[in-house]
Image (cartoon, helix red, strand yellow):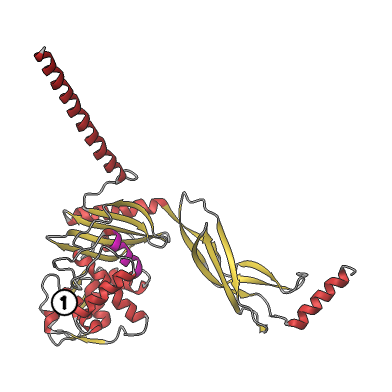
C-alpha cells in the first residue's frame, strides 16, 4: 500500500513538472510573437520603428528599457544647437574657439587643436559626420558656457520632450555612471531634431574634407554607413561603446514617406545596420504619402450675405501631403478658420487657414487666400441684407 501511494505521488509530481514546463514555454513563445511583427525579429537589446510625423509605432522591442545610448546622445547636442540656430540666438557662421578640455576628449574625434577656431556649422558637421567627441564638447561649451551647464540644458530639454527614462551625464555619450536612455526616448529627441531639416544636410553627408586653416586636412567619414548604402537614408546618428554595444537612430525617406528606426545594443555594426534597414523597409511597405490639398485648389465658398449671392472662394496657398498608413480608413476633413475684419480684401490676399484632420487628429494646415476682391460689410450692410430678405418673403 505504501509503495502504491509513493508511486502516485511520483506520478503527480511528474505531471506537475511537465505542466509547469509547458506553461513556461508558452509564455516565452507569446512574448516572442509580440516582438515579431510582419515576420521581423531583431538581434539587439531594444528596438523601435516609428512614423515620425504621426508618432505611430510599427514595431517595438523593450522600447522603454534603459540602456547606455553611446554617441546617439549627440542627437540632443545637435538638437539644442539647431534650436539656437533656428531661433536666431546663434548663427552657423559664428566662431568657436577650441578649449584644452575639448581637445583632450578621447574616442571618436575630428582632431581639433587647442585654440583652433571653427564655425558653428563646421562643429555641427564634426558632430554629425565623424561623431567627434571633441566637437560635441566644443559646442556644449559655446552654448552653455561649460559642458556641465550644457548637460543641465540637455536634461531640461529631455524633460520637456517627455523623455522620462533618460538622464544625460555628458554631451557626447562616452561611458558615465547613470548616463542612460531608452529607444522610445531616443525616438522623441530624434523626431524633434527632424523638425530642423537643415541638420539632414550634415547627417546625410558621407565624406567631407576639412582643410581650411589646417596644416593637415582632416577626412571626416560618416559612421552611419547607411547614408551611403541605404537609398534615401540621411541621418541621424550612430553610437558604440563596450557597454552600449552598437546603436543607431536611422532615418530615411522614400516616395515622400519618412521612417525612423532605433536600434540599441546590437552585437555588431553589421547586425545593427541590417536590422535598422529591415525595419525601415518594413515601414515603407506600410505607409503611403497622399496629397490632400493641391496648390491653388478651391477649398470652400464663403458667403458674404445671408442670401449667398455675394461670396468669395478660399484657395490653398500650398500643396499639402500626409503620410498615411495603408490600412487607415479614417475620414479626412478640412475646416477653414478665418479672421475677417470690416475692411476691403484684395485678390490673392491670405485670409485664414485650412486645418486638416485625419479622423479626430489634426495633421496639419495650409494658408488660404481669396480668389477676388471683396469688402466685409458693417452694421448698415447687414441691415440692408435683412430688409431685402423681408421684401423677398413678402413680409
Q: Is 10 displayed left or right of 34 in the figure?
A: left
Q: Which residue is mark 1?
A: 134
Image quarter in which the C terminus is found: bottom right
Instruction: Report the front residue among 236 and 2.
Output: 2
Where is 321 relative to 10, above or below?
below
- At 19% from the left and 79% from the top, the residue drawn is 147
Where is 39 relative to 135, above or below?
above
Q: Is 196 displayed left or right of 368 in the figure?
A: left
- At 72% from the left and 74% from the top, the residue drawn is 304
- At 31% from the left and 43% from the top, the residue drawn is 39
Q: Which segment is the magenta one? A: 184-192
Name of the residue lying farthest toward the top: 1
Question: In this rendering, does residue 205 appear at all?
Answer: no
What percent of the width, then of the height, locates residue 123?
23, 79
What percent of the width, then of the height, locates residue 393?
87, 67
Write down the quadrant of residue 105 in the picture: bottom left
What percent of the width, then of the height, locates residue 243?
13, 60
Write down the quadrant of residue 192 in the picture: bottom left
Q: Secondary structure at mark 1?
A: helix
Name of the residue lying farthest toward the front: 1
Question: In this rendering, does residue 11 appear at all?
Answer: yes
Write down the quadrant of residue 390 in the picture: bottom right
Amino acid at each position: 500500500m505504501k509503495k502504491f501511494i509513493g508511486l502516485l505521488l511520483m506520478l503527480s509530481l511528474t505531471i506537475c513538472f511537465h505542466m509547469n514546463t509547458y506553461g513556461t514555454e508558452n509564455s516565452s513563445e507569446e512574448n516572442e510573437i509580440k516582438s515579431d511583427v510582419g515576420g521581423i525579429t531583431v538581434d539587439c537589446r531594444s528596438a523601435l520603428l516609428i512614423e515620425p510625423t504621426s508618432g505611430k509605432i510599427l514595431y517595438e522591442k523593450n522600447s522603454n528599457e534603459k540602456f547606455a545610448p553611446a554617441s546617439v546622445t549627440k542627437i540632443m547636442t545637435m538638437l539644442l544647437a539647431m534650436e539656437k540656430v533656428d531661433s536666431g540666438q546663434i548663427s552657423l557662421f559664428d566662431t568657436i574657439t577650441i578649449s584644452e578640455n575639448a581637445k583632450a576628449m578621447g574616442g571618436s574625434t575630428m582632431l581639433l587643436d587647442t585654440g583652433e577656431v571653427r564655425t558653428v556649422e563646421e562643429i555641427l558637421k564634426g558632430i554629425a559626420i565623424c561623431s567627434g567627441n571633441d566637437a560635441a564638447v566644443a559646442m556644449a561649451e559655446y552654448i552653455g558656457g561649460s559642458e556641465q551647464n550644457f548637460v543641465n540644458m540637455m536634461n531640461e530639454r529631455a524633460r520637456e520632450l517627455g523623455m522620462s527614462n533618460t538622464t544625460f551625464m555628458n554631451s557626447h555619450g562616452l561611458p558615465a555612471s547613470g548616463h542612460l536612455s531608452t529607444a522610445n526616448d531616443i525616438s522623441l529627441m530624434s523626431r524633434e531634431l527632424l523638425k530642423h531639416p537643415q541638420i539632414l544636410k550634415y547627417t546625410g553627408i558621407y565624406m567631407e574634407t576639412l582643410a581650411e586653416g589646417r596644416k593637415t586636412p582632416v577626412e571626416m567619414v560618416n559612421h552611419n554607413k547607411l547614408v551611403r548604402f541605404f537609398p534615401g537614408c540621411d541621418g541621424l546618428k550612430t553610437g558604440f561603446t563596450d557597454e552600449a554595444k552598437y546603436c543607431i537612430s536611422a532615418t530615411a525617406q522614400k516616395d515622400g514617406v519618412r521612417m525612423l528606426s532605433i536600434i540599441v545594443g546590437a552585437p555588431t555594426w553589421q547586425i545593427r545596420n541590417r536590422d535598422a534597414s529591415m525595419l525601415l523597409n518594413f515601414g515603407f511597405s506600410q505607409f503611403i504619402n497622399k496629397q490632400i490639398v493641391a496648390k491653388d485648389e478651391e477649398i470652400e465658398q464663403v458667403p458674404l450675405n445671408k442670401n449667398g449671392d455675394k461670396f468669395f472662394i478660399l484657395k490653398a496657398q500650398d500643396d499639402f501631403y500626409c503620410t498615411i498608413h495603408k490600412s487607415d480608413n479614417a475620414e479626412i476633413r478640412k475646416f477653414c478658420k478665418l479672421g475677417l475684419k470690416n475692411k476691403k480684401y484684395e485678390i490673392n490676399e491670405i485670409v485664414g487657414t485650412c486645418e486638416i484632420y485625419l479622423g479626430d487628429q489634426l495633421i496639419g494646415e495650409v494658408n488660404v487666400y481669396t480668389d477676388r476682391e471683396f469688402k466685409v460689410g458693417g452694421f448698415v450692410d447687414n441691415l440692408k441684407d435683412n430688409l431685402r430678405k423681408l421684401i423677398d418673403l413678402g413680409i
